[in-house]
Amino acid sequence: MRSVHETSRRLLAEQVLPELDRLRVAEHRRGAGSRVLDFGAEAPGGLEAGRLLAELCLAGLGRVGFGATSLGPTRVSVDVTTDHPVQACLASQYAGWPISVGDYFAMGSGPFRAARGREALLIDEGLTASADATIGVLETRVLPDDGTVESIARACGVDASGLTLAIAPTASLAGMVQIVARSIETCLHKLHELKFPLARIESARGTAPLPPSTLKDRIAMGWTNDAILYGGEVTLWIDSEGLDLESLGPKVPSSASADYGRPFGEIFEAYGRDFYRIDPLLFSPASVTFIDRRSGRVRRFGSVSAEVLARSFGS
């Protein structure tokens, strides 16, 4: 299989760059030729921009679309499928790089994480991958300046001319779509923490409800987390030979956490707005289904909570 850098660059070249006007995405150039694409900070962006932004996060190794759901006021779901779940979600989509350059801060996801290759998750799973050119997605409201872009390029081991950064704040429509598209990623990250052999996962599908719109990033953060924690449903096709799913399964959904049961915004406030004080076991989908490719046996753990979603989205 081609690297996450190759597949994401192909998606960028074929589906994003030729359609910037239609997507309502603005292109900016930075020092030494870096490209910065604004999906919703100053540019309008939108649903289709968010869909493609989410696919860039997945390095072009997953497909994102919209469906119908009974959960939430929008009645719209963000649906994700991939036959390369570990590469797409953990080598690329996971927001594992907190970028801090001077006063600039953003959460980084996308294939440029694999090029940087410094996260324990990437090293543990053998997911580092050097590159001549790469793409990063920044969750932020501020476009990076020349110095920030050049610092990121150095960290990735690429020339600045080989770096493309896609920007969207949490509360933008594109930003909310790409975050809600992380249902599979949160599940795989939880499984990694539980020492599940990720190579056993062959394919995956995830869905979660798209929250209403807001202009406030902190509210959007709560809503997008709740969409997955209380409305996310993930199905994994696996080889379960020798695995004790009956013991592991109940630990995977968000309901395994002592913090489960309240909207994320309330939990965040209760911990003094300190993300790292929140129980890490909370961050996973509401429901996870395992399908054994050998026997066809299906095991489902957890369930969605329309009640908590109503409290969250209605606040």
Image (spheres, rainbow, N blue to C red):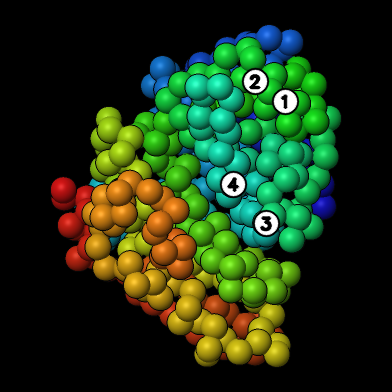
Q: Which residue is mark 3?
A: 121
Q: From the viewer's perspective, is 162 left or right of 312?
A: right
Instruction: Name the residue rendered at 27%, 30% in the picture.
Output: 215
Which is more N-terminal, label 1 or label 3? 3
Q: Are marks 4 and 2 in contact (CB under 8 Å)?
A: no
Secondary structure at badge 2 equals helix
Q: Which residue is mark 1?
A: 153
Q: Are marks 4 and 3 in contact (CB under 8 Å)?
A: yes
Residue 172 versus residue 181 in the image, above or below? above
Q: Which residue is mark 2?
A: 149
Q: Are marks 1 and 2 in contact (CB under 8 Å)?
A: yes
Which is more N-terminal, label 2 or label 3? 3
Residue 6 locus on image (x, y percent): 78, 38
Q: Nearer the viewer, residue 15 or 53?
A: 53
Q: Nearer the viewer, residue 272 or 151?
A: 272
Q: Which residue is mark 4?
A: 96
Instruction: Name the residue rendered at 25%, 63% in the picture.
Output: 262
- Amino acid type indicated by mark 2: Val
Q: Are marks 3 and 1 in contact (CB under 8 Å)?
A: no
Residue 264 locus on image (x, y percent): 30, 55
Residue 251 locus on image (x, y percent): 48, 78
